[in-house]
């Protein structure tokens, strides 16, 4: 017994843990008598040592019967804290990875990497929870947990603030509502324990955390709002008739026509839908200069009022798509479509008019599933399922899922879809398009008024713009050049 060291068991702390020291040096701690015996065995004491032997063990302020640790409460709090940190880690990794790996702009990628880094810090905080809620062998474990909880509070606040703008149901909503509530609870516990006391410079620490939150919020606003708005976006369309040629064997005149599309802006562009139309116009000469009298009717139809033209008709003689849904153009890139128009030599048209129209979307605002969008669904075929539409006539439907290039938008909104309709008759060819949360199904008719408002919002959010150009050529001039 003479070789057995004299052990001092300190009074329990606020959590019920009792420190064990020998010669003024803390050698361990225990939650219970069994834990104390384990520490004593490590010091070389026999297994059967009497805990009431005052020659070996000195009990400070509280005797051997005082062990206030609530084991299950402590373990439940530990598990709850770790679960919240790990769930937040997973969420931030899910949110950050698409932007970090696939965002078009540098700022958006930085935002993604910040979320992944924040998730990694929370993973470390989850490990530090074991020590902080346990015997606290690492001095700063509580501070690490505090950082993880503050990250959760800041990021979940951003998610909730973004969600409140439109308040749409999403699968992620219960997750960040739960994490926001959890972060408030965890922060209350940490402040109640005053974990900042071990931090060398608590004011600087608080300032650093506040600045980090401000940086994350500012970077989100810059990458999601300012940068995609400030970068120039412009797609130029041109149409030009060429020199005609006669067909040596057939009664045709071959008129070359060139369409060109060029991205003259600074942002890559998706082509959502496009069309080209070629008309032949016939005019009736007015000897009494009556052409301007009916100018209102002409303008209502989108035509021209001409002094010496009493009436004019135009007929579509060719129509088609320039590139089709899902084509894209990088800045400075152009695409040319050359067409040869075949018209009879006995043509009665006065003018030939070519029109090219196109709807484009900024690629720095969103990413489209092009394999989906490029697939054509004839609405008149029953095998197309939800795309079958008995009242849609001769319509081809394209649809593709679109995600915002800032993934925070995606996890706080319902999924968005690009829907394109291309329809035509013998007299008219036209298209329609929409970006909305409505997934096309002819069997489910949405609220058209609300859908219209949503489409307007989404067009602005994703930077959708329409472009068109037209050119005319005199048939008489064509004939004179042969």
Image (cartoon, helix red, strand yellow):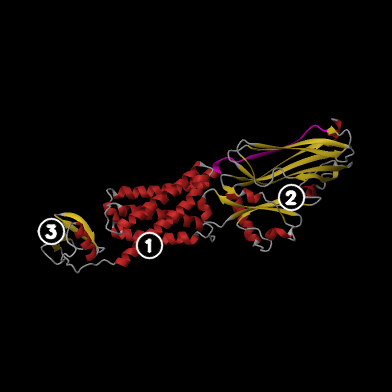
Residue 145 is at least partly visible in this image: no
Residue 297 seen in the current view: yes
Task: Give the distance between the C-alpha atoms of the residues marked 3 and 1, in whole angstroms.
Answer: 39 Å
Residue 212 placement (x, y as % from top left): 39, 48
Say whether marks 3 and 1 touch (CB < 8 Å).
Answer: no
Query: Which residue is pictured at 14% across the width and 62% down the height?
Result: 57
Q: Nearer the viewer, residue 132 or 53?
A: 53
Task: Indicate whether residue 44 is drawn in magenta.
Answer: no
First of labels 3, 1 by sequence position: 3
Q: Earlier in the sequence, mark 2 or mark 3?
A: 3
Residue at the (60%, 47%) spot, across then down: 463
Question: Residue 6 got which mark?
Answer: 3
Residue 232 magenta-highlighted: yes
Q: Which residue is mark 2?
A: 430
- Badge 1: residue crowd in 10 Å (few <14, some 14–19, many ≥20): some
Q: Secondary structure at mark 2?
A: strand
Q: Is residue 474 left or right of residue 97?
A: right
The part of the chain drawn in magenta is 229-244
Q: Secondary structure at mark 1?
A: helix
Residue contact at pointers 1 and 2, CB within 8 angstroms:
no
Decide: is 244 above or below 195: above
- Residue occupied by mark 1: 80
């Amino acid at each position: 017994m003479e070789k057995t060291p004299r052990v001092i068991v300190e009074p329990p702390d606020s959590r019920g843990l009792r420190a064990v020291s020998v010669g003024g040096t803390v050698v361990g701690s225990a939650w219970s008598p069994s834990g104390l015996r384990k520490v004593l065995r490590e010091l070389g004491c026999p297994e059967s040592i009497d805990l009431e032997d005052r020659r070996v063990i000195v009990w400070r302020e509280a005797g051997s019967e005082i062990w206030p640790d609530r084991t299950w409460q402590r373990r439940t709090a530990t598990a709850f804290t770790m679960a919240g940190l790990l769930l937040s880690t997973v969420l931030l990794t899910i949110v950050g990875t698409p932007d970090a790996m696939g965002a078009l702009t540098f700022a958006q990628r930085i935002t993604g990497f910040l979320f992944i880094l924040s998730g990694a810090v929370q993973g470390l905080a989850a490990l530090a929870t074991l020590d902080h809620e346990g015997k606290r062998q690492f001095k700063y474990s509580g501070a690490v947990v505090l950082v993880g909880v503050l990250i959760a509070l800041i990021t979940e606040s951003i998610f909730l603030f973004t969600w409140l703008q439109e308040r749409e149901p999403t699968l992620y909503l219960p997750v960040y509502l739960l994490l926001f509530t959890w972060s408030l609870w965890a922060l209350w516990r940490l402040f109640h324990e005053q974990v900042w006391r071990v931090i060398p410079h608590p004011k600087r620490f608080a300032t650093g955390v506040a600045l980090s939150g401000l940086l994350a919020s500012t970077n989100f606003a810059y990458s999601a709002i300012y940068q995609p708005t400030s970068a120039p976006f412009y797609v130029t369309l041109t149409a030009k008739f060429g020199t005609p040629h006669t067909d040596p064997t057939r009664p045709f005149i071959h008129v070359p026509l060139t369409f060109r599309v060029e991205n003259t802006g600074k942002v890559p562009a998706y082509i959502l839908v496009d069309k080209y139309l070629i008309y032949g116009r016939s005019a009736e000469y007015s000897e009494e200069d009556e052409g301007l009298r009916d100018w209102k009717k002409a303008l209502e139809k989108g035509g021209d009022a001409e002094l010496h033209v009493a009436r004019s008709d135009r007929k579509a003689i060719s129509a088609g798509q320039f590139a089709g849904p899902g084509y894209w153009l990088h800045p400075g890139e152009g695409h040319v479509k050359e067409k040869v128009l075949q018209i009879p030599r006995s043509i009665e048209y006065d003018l030939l008019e070519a029109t090219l129209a196109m709807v484009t979307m900024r690629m720095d605002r969103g990413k489209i599933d092009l394999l989906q969008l490029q697939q054509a669904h004839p609405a008149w075929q029953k095998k197309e399922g939800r795309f079958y539409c008995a009242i849609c006539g001769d319509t081809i439907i394209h649809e593709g899922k679109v995600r915002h290039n800032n993934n925070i938008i995606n996890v706080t909104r319902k999924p968005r879809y690009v829907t394109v309709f291309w329809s035509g008759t013998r007299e008219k060819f036209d298209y329609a398009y929409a970006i909305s949360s409505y997934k096309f199904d002819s069997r489910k008719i949405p609220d058209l008024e609300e859908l219209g408002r949503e489409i307007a919002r989404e067009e602005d959010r994703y930077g959708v713009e329409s472009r068109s150009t037209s050119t005319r050529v005199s048939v008489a001039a064509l004939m004179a050049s042969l």
